[in-house]
Amino acid sequence: MANKEDFKFDKRADKYDEGFEGKSSKKFYDLVTTNVELTEGMNVLDAGCGTGTILRRLADKCPINGFGIDVEEKMLEQAKTKCPEMDIRLCSCDQTPFADAQFDVVVACMAYHHFPDKDGFSREAARLLKSGGRLYIADPKLPLPLRKVVNAALDIHKINGRIYTADEISANFAPFGFTKLFDRSDAYAQLVCLERK
Ligand SMILES: C[S@@+](CC[C@H](N)C(=O)[O-])C[C@H]1O[C@@H](n2cnc3c(N)ncnc32)[C@H](O)[C@@H]1O
């Protein structure tokens, strides 16, 4: 039986980008980078930033003030190397040290399905975003039969994670003052863009 420690990203942080997860995340990175609307000087937070790939790609697309948070230290070491000019911090996405309405954009790429307290993250994203600010959730997309099997297996093995449809993601955030602007997908990757009231 796998130990909870075996699932830690830190155990494979130095090989994450070059390994299966980093490589198979390319579709997610492309969806986010293409669809996130940025203007110069925006404050952008990547929740669950991992090794910082999305922050780097967004900053290369447009000069932003980049902020990254994650709960795993070795993943953050990689992010700090990749994004030396950014504010990268060790904290959970449901309890951050940032000010109310500090951000124009919050992104969670391949991270939302890992967050243990999804309502806590929704509440925190609503607090952190300016009115009219945007939240982008990039998460896996699976067809119905496979989604049910995967979610059942995650439940049985008590592994924290759930695969949602775009409509379910929108519904999860609606009680916290978010409305869906659009969703896009490419094969097994989907992106949902929500606006903060
Ligand atoms: C699959 S990785 C994705 C990393 C990065 N966003 C990417 O796309 O390359 C998921 C990340 O979410 C982080 N994570 C999990 N729970 C978290 C939480 N409560 N708050 C912040 N980050 C969290 C993990 O430590 C991990 O680095």
Image: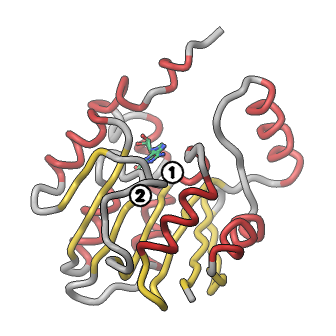
Colour pattern = secondary structure
Q: Is mark 2 within 8 Å of ligand 1?
A: yes
Q: Position of residue 147 (x, y in %)?
A: 80, 47
Marks 1 and 2: CB-CB under 8 Å? yes
Q: Is mark 1 within 8 Å of ligand 1?
A: yes
Quarter holding residue 59: bottom left
Q: Position of residue 87 (x, y in %)?
A: 19, 60
Q: Position of residue 155 (x, y in %)?
A: 78, 32
What residue sits 33% from the left and 41% below the top? Answer: 17
**Residue 182 versus residue 92: which sits nearer the camera?**
92
Residue beneath disc 2: 47
Q: Secondary structure at mark 2?
A: strand
Above or below, comparing residue 177 to residue 56 in the picture: below
Image disc number at residue 111? 1
Q: Position of residue 25 (x, y in %)?
A: 47, 50
Eye-nearest disc, 1 or 2: 2
Disc 1 to disc 2, C-alpha distance: 7 Å
